[in-house]
């Protein structure tokens, strides 16, 4: 099992793909390296060497341990820099989804020489108290006597596009897979990770590399209008709207997101 030993953490990661340019894929809140599975087939090229894909389990997620190691955006960013050191990678293209995008911005701010480019998927440098309140509610549901799938049924409308709920069996299949996942985040770990957002300060972001943002047209968590306003603070950023996609943009539109990533790093 590939892990990097840090002073306070055993950081689990996946290292796959080809011998092309390295891409560091950073998962969002309550997600881990497995959250990128829908997009991986679209990133590996058939005719040319595909990119090298590195996917860490952030603190309090997946197989990184212990789940209660100290955590905040800055520590997660430092973990990513340490992982690049461990793998002998001088600079990587960084793709961060949701909270992973905050970590990506932290990496580009704290270790600017390690980031060749930065793509932000369904995220912007802003802190929305409404979303923290929503996640707190999900934690409360998990700690209640409700059935194990209750919090997911309450959460899915916030992250998946509306059309997903019109497909017979689609949501039940997603629920079954989530409940059967052997490395699912515990409620304690989820609450611990949520506290990493308490100290997040978007005013501290200072990104000097090329940046592109992908915003889901149906995203309820990070709506397009406030996201665009916040992203305007990043000089020279290129913003794209992904139709038929909500917050889980790389699940709703994996091929479109992969095409944007590959075009961006090829420039």
Image (cartoon, grey):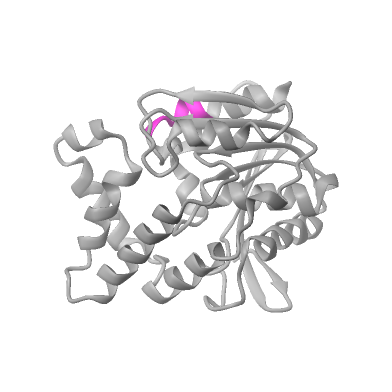
Q: x%, y% of residue 259?
A: 55, 24
Kindly identify the residue that appears in the image at 17 percent across and 33 percent down.
Answer: 166
Q: x%, y% of residue 110?
A: 79, 54
**Where 101 falls versus 47 (above or below)?**
below
Report the quarter where the C terminus lies: top right
Kindly identify the residue that appears in the image at 57 percent across and 67 percent down.
Answer: 59
**Where 174 falls versus 59 (above or below)?**
above
Kindly identify the residue that appears in the image at 35 percent across and 58 percent down.
Answer: 134
Q: Main secondary structure of the magenta part?
A: helix
**Where 70 falls versus 246 (above or below)?**
below
Is residue 108 visible to us here? yes
Report the quarter where the N terminus lies: bottom right
Relative side of 168 to 117, left or right: left
In front of the other: 191 or 64: 191
Labels in figure, total: 0
Relative side of 186 to 103, left or right: left
In front of the other: 35 or 242: 242
Residue 255 covered by magenta stretch: yes
In front of the other: 57 or 246: 246
Is residue 90 visible to us here? no
Q: Residue furthest left?
A: 168
- Res 49 → quadrant: top right
Q: x%, y% of residue 76?
A: 65, 62
- Res 221 → quadrant: top left
Relative side of 256 to 155, left or right: right
Bounds of the magenta span?
A: 252-257
Q: x%, y% of residue 244?
A: 35, 25
């Amino acid at each position: 099992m590939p892990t990097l030993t840090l002073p306070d953490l055993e950081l689990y990661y996946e290292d796959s793909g080809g011998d092309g340019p390295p891409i560091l894929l950073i998962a969002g809140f309550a997600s881990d390296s497995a959250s990128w599975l829908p997009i991986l087939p679209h990133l590996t090229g058939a005719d040319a060497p595909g990119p090298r894909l590195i996917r860490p389990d952030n603190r309090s997620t997946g197989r990184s341990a212990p789940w209660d190691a100290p955590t905040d955006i800055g520590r997660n960013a430092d973990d990513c820099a340490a992982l690049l050191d461990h793998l002998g990678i001088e600079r990587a293209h960084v793709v961060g989804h949701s909270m992973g995008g905050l970590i990506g911005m932290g990496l580009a701010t704290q270790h600017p020489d390690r980031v060749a480019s930065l793509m932000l998927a369904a995220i912007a440098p802003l802190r929305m108290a409404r979303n923290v309140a929503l996640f707190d509610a999900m934690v409360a549901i998990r700690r209640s006597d409700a059935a194990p799938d209750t919090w997911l049924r309450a959460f899915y409308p916030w992250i998946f596009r509306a059309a997903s709920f019109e497909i017979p069996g689609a949501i039940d299949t997603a629920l079954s897979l989530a409940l059967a996942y052997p490395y699912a985040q515990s409620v304690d770990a989820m609450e611990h990770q949520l506290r990493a957002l308490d100290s997040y300060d978007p005013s501290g972001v200072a990104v000097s590399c090329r940046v592109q943002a992908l915003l889901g047209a149906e995203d309820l968590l990070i709506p397009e209008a406030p996201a665009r306003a916040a992203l305007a603070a990043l000089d020279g950023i290129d913003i794209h709207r992904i139709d038929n996609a909500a917050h889980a943009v790389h699940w709703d539109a994996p091929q479109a997101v992969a095409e944007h990533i590959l075009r961006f790093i090829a420039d």
